[in-house]
Amino acid sequence: MRTKRSLLGVIGTLTLVLASVFTTGPAQAASAPDDKRGGHMMIMPSAPEGAGSAQALAAAPPTTSPGVYSVHVPPGSGVFCRTGNLCAAVYDPSAGTFKVFFFYSCNRYSLSNWNGWGEFQNSQTGGALGHLYDGNGNHLRVMFADNGVYAQDWAPVWSLRNC
C-alpha cells in the first residue's frame, strides 16, 4: 500500500508542476508605469483612418523575422517598454489594434506587413542605437536610446537593427 501512495504522490506533484509550466504567462507582460525594473510607458495613437473596413480586416498581420515577443494594444491604451528593449508599434488591421514588438536581442530584423503610421521607443541601455532600413538596405533613420516616443511611417521600412 505504501508504494501506491508514493506513486500517487509523484503523479500528483508532476501534474502540479506541468500545470504551472503551461499556465504561466509571458515574463514580459505590460507593467505599471512605476515598475521597479525600469522602462517607460508608450501610449498608442488613434487608429488610422479607414481602420475596421472589410479590406483592412482581410490584411495580413505585421510580423518580424526572426520573431520577437509582441502584444496587441488598443488605440489610446498604454504598454510598458522595459529597459533594455527597443519597442515598436504598428497598426495591425487584421486585429484592429496596435501590435507592439519588443526587440531585445541584438539583431537585424526583417519586417513584413508593416504599413502606415505607428511609433517606437528605444529604452535600451548603454546608448545602443537602433537603425531603420529601406528595401535596398539604405539607412533611413537612427533611433536614439533616449526613452522618447517617436512617430514613424513604417511603409518604407523593410528592416530594423536594434543595436
Image (cartoon, helix red, strand yellow):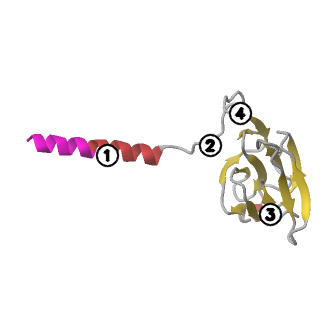
The circle drawn on residue 37 is none
Q: What distance separates the C-alpha of mark 1 from that of mark 4?
A: 36 Å
Q: What distance separates the C-alpha of mark 2 from that of mark 3?
A: 23 Å
Residue 109 magenta-highlighted: no
Q: Nearer the viewer, mark 2 or mark 4?
A: 4
Q: What distance separates the C-alpha of mark 2 from that of mark 1?
A: 26 Å
Q: What distance separates the C-alpha of mark 3 from that of mark 1?
A: 44 Å
Mark closer to the chain start, 3 or 4? 4
Is residue 54 visible to us here?
no
Residue 27, picture quadrant: top right
Mark closer to the chain start, 2 or 4? 2
Mark closer to the chain start, 2 or 1? 1
Span shown in magenta: 1-11
Residue holding disc 4: 38
Is 52 located above or below residue 12 in the figure? Answer: below
Query: Is 4 in front, or is 142?
Result: 142
Count of numbered circles in the view:
4
- Three-letter amino acid code of the residue under disc 4: Gly
Residue 18 pos. (x, y %): 38, 47
Query: Is 129 in front, or is 76?
Result: 129
Secondary-structure class at tag 1: helix
- Three-letter amino acid code of the residue under disc 1: Leu
Residue holding disc 2: 28
Residue 156 pos. (x, y %): 88, 64
Is 140 located above or below residue 76 in the figure? Answer: below
Quadrant of the drawing holding the N terminus: top left
Is residue 144 visible to us here?
yes
- Three-letter amino acid code of the residue under disc 2: Gln
Residue holding disc 3: 159
Secondary-structure class at tag 2: loop
Give the residue displayed 71% in from the left and 65% down from the top: 60
110 left or right of 19? Answer: right
